[in-house]
Amino acid sequence: MSQTVVRFRRGTVERRTSETEIVLSLDLDGSGEVRAETGVPFLDHMLAALGRHAGFDLAVTASGDAAMDPHHTVEDIGIALGQALRQALGDRAGVARYGHAYAPLDEALARVVVDCSGRPYLSYQAAMPEPVIGADFAASLVEEFWRSLAVNAALTIHVDLLRARNAHHAAEAIFKAGALALQTATRLSGDPARVPSTKGVLA
């Protein structure tokens, strides 16, 4: 009699520093349910888009010095999400490995390409049309988030902002394209015992 092996692809991270305290949980095979309470409203908005369009269940709470400057919170949540993603992927056997997507938001158009390579690398070609999004979210923090995620999840990610006139639209297009690319790259689409690499390992 054959047996079906159920793989639970989840990760949980608690990160505490002198600047932030973060608790984050991730389920790659969820339904896109997101609960984000980071103290940075624009980041909450982006995380909601990321989880929803990737089909990931994501819960994250954070406290710290965001009222002074959201930089540490954004960077540390990128780190925690990357670590949770790395946990959830395990040895990466059976995953599609590669994913790419375009996402528009009005005049903005972004392209993101993901490789679950085991080799952390971010290429970020996104000249933001405005330095600040909303009241106080520096547009440069979008790159910080994706670099932290790529490094800690051991992913190769290429982000290209093809056009934009509004920084909010640009950031949201990047997060949505990233979500769709991650959704494709992390899907279980092959032999669950086979790592999609000629080396036999993704590390």
Image: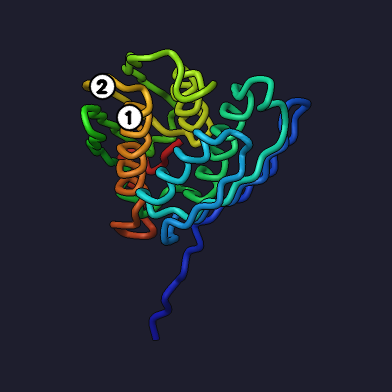
For the residue labelled by badge 1, is the local secondary structure a helix, a strand or a loop? helix
Disc 2 and disc 1 in contact, CB within 8 angstroms: yes
- Quarter location, residue 165: top left
For badge 1, the amino acid type reads His
Specify few, some or many for label 2: CA neighbours under 10 Å numbering under 14, 14-19, or 20 or more. many
Residue identified by numbered label 1: 169
Q: Would residue 160 be found to the left or right of residue 59 on screen?
A: left
Q: Is residue 125 above or below residue 5?
A: above
| Residue 1 position (above or below residue 16) | below
Mark 2 highlights which residue? 164
Q: Position of residue 187 (x, y in %)?
A: 34, 53
Element at label 2? loop
Residue lying at 41% horizontally and 43% vertically, measured from the top left: 50
What's the distance in space between the residues labelled 2 and 1, CA to CA?
Answer: 7 Å
Please name whichever residue, 8 or 72, is drawn nearer the observer in this view of the structure. 72
**For residue 176, above or below residue 28:** above
Residue reaching furthest to the front:
135
Q: Earlier in the sequence, mark 2 or mark 1?
A: 2
Most foreground residue, 111 or 11: 111
